[in-house]
Image (spheres, helix red, strand yellow):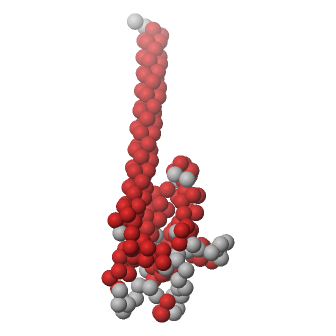
Amino acid sequence: MDATEFQGEIAVVQLVVGVVQLVVGVWLTTVATRIASNQEQLMRTQIGNSVTDRMLEIDRMILEHPGVWKRLMDETRRVYSKADASTHYFDPAHSDAEARLRVKAIVYYQLNFFDELFVSISQNARLSKEFEFDDWQTYMRKRLLHPLFREVLEESPDIFGRMLVDFANRVWKQPPTEPLEPRVI
């Protein structure tokens, strides 16, 4: 075999190796894309399940403890001022502090749920659209206008995420368009 034939065979081998590399590269890219797509679908499913579970848990708490929910609704028109301690509902000096603590537990649970919504959905445009985050914001806005939600958030903002606290502050700066009614809370 002379040098020209040898170089020709080397060129053919290089071409075959190049084609194999290209095919393997395309295959690996396809596999990686499918894995990423499956992982994203799994993440969306997990977030959807978590949101549904939280909502069902809130519903369950309301059904199992209607008196606590009624107490929360009875306070819808309460006037609250962080500066005026006499307006603080969760003051432990109240004679019914234990019952008020149950109300506080429901408020905390819902605020933690809102925090989870901001962290898991709001930062991803696709998830935000898929889970209708704008509608969730409307729901949260109504809840945050309730004076007991405001009291908890204003007294302990450091235990909640910055996105929720910032959102709440924006809600409170805008006057409500209509009076807050217990039936819409």
Q: Does 122 appear above or below 78?
A: above
Front position in the image: 161 or 83: 83
Q: Seen from this angle, which residue lies furthest left?
A: 98
Rendered location of residue 155, percent (x, y):
45, 83
Residue drawn at (35%, 85%) of the image: 97
Q: Seen from this angle, which residue lies furthest top?
A: 1
Quadrant for the N terminus in the image: top left
Q: Is residue 150 visible?
A: no
Q: Seen from this angle, which residue lies furthest right?
A: 177
Front position in the image: 39 or 152: 152
Q: Does 119 appear above or below 168?
A: above
Rendered location of residue 163, percent (x, y):
51, 68
Q: Is residue 86 left or right of residue 92?
A: right
Q: Does 59 appear above or below 165?
A: above
Residue drawn at (35%, 80%) of the image: 99
Q: Is residue 135 left or right of residue 148?
A: right
Residue drawn at (55%, 80%) of the image: 77
Rendered location of residue 14, percent (x, y):
45, 20
Q: Is residue 132 visible?
A: yes
Q: How many marks?
A: 0
Rendered location of residue 109, percent (x, y):
39, 68
Residue drawn at (58%, 63%) of the image: 138
Front position in the image: 95 or 167: 95
